[in-house]
Image (cartoon, rainbow, N blue to C red):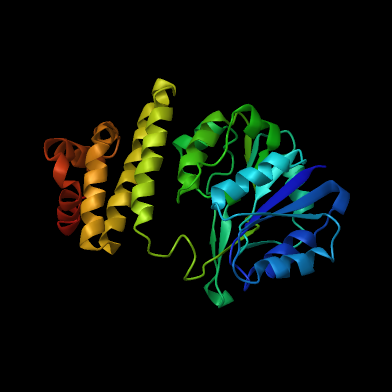
Amino acid sequence: MKLSIIIPVYNVEKYVEKCLRSCAEQDISFDEYEIIIINDGAKDNSLEIIERVAKDYNNITILSQENAGLSSARNKGLSIAKGEYVWFVDSDDWIDKNCLQNILSEVDGNDVLVMGYIEAYDDISKNNIVDYKDKNINFGKCLLLSWFFFPAQLYVFKRSFLLNNSLSFYLGIFHEDSEFTPKMLYYADKIKILTKPIYYFYKRPNSITTSVNPKKSFDYIVVASSLSIFSQDVEIKYENKFNDIISLIINSSLHNSYNMNRIAFKELNHYIYEHKYLFKHLIGSSILKYKFEGMLFCIFPKYTIFIYRLLRKFNFK
């Protein structure tokens, strides 16, 4: 078994069949790869649809669990995967026609295969390719120091690489990829960037990434805290990069506060105050904006959101 494609499914009845068929109708034989579908307690007709589609292919496995979130579903799929390589595909996205043979050829001998993506819209004239400019990077830490995409769907992993480095997805949070990907790239000794994007990232308006949910801001702080702990053991020359990443994540949390009501606003401000040790990463960042924020947050730790909004009002960069 060369490849395991892991697809978590939750309330995607409008999109899941297109995703599954794009993965199943490929250019390698069924005995070379498996498709593992984790039904994460879907409440719509998703399960009925995937069961119907699975009858057409003999390499699809379906497991159902109580709703526990994307991280739990991915971890469950990884725990039963048999492939030498694993690829996490979201159930409202799809992959290019006849791309798996090329995937297996390119990933061979590497810890991770890296790819850009196509922003896909219902109006295909709006589709947009988002790709890496420098495709010669072949070392995970080099990509970490450069510029990279957070979503785990844009990487194909050697399964033993994930297991040997105890890499899995943080349970119970949004933004699990922001916590996972920097650590993954730090550990990846050998990577390869795919020549052209083959992953279609469907931009639907009610997806997890675009919906308004106050919990997202709190979870960003959870991610920042996890990466802060991880950064304590990285080599000195990568400390600034982790400071930059953690600072970006803190800023993402603060930015999401614009979508909050007054009660959630106060709760987030207090939650950030409880995690004020994170401000050291802002001060240690290589980016002037973050340094200045960090200094002000340390002086006025109970007014972080107010300070952030004030700086944005004056367009401080």
Instruction: State how many labels appear.
Output: 0
Residue in the picture at 31% in, 57% down: 256
User: Which residue is situated farthest in the front direction here?
Assistant: 66
Residue 51, image quadrant: bottom right
User: Residue 171, percent across and down?
Assistant: 51, 44
User: Residue 168, percent across and down?
Assistant: 57, 38
Residue in the picture at 28% in, 35% down: 278
The answer to whether residue 155 of the structure is visible from this angle is no
Residue 264, image quadrant: bottom left
Residue 232, image quadrant: top left
Q: Is residue 101 left or right of residue 254?
A: right
Residue in the picture at 68% in, 51% down: 6
Q: Nearer the viewer, residue 63 or 89?
A: 63
Say above or below: 111 vs 200: above
Q: Nearer the viewer, residue 64 or 288?
A: 64
User: Which residue is situated farthest in the left direction here?
Assistant: 299
| The N terminus sits in image quarter | top right
Say above or below: 271 vs 276: below
Q: Nearer the viewer, residue 40 or 258?
A: 40
User: Residue 257, percent across and down?
Assistant: 27, 57
Say above or below: 90 vs 85: below
The answer to whether residue 134 of the structure is visible from this angle is yes
User: Residue 41, percent across and down?
Assistant: 61, 59
Q: Is residue 84 left or right of residue 40?
A: right
Q: Nearer the viewer, residue 283 or 177?
A: 177
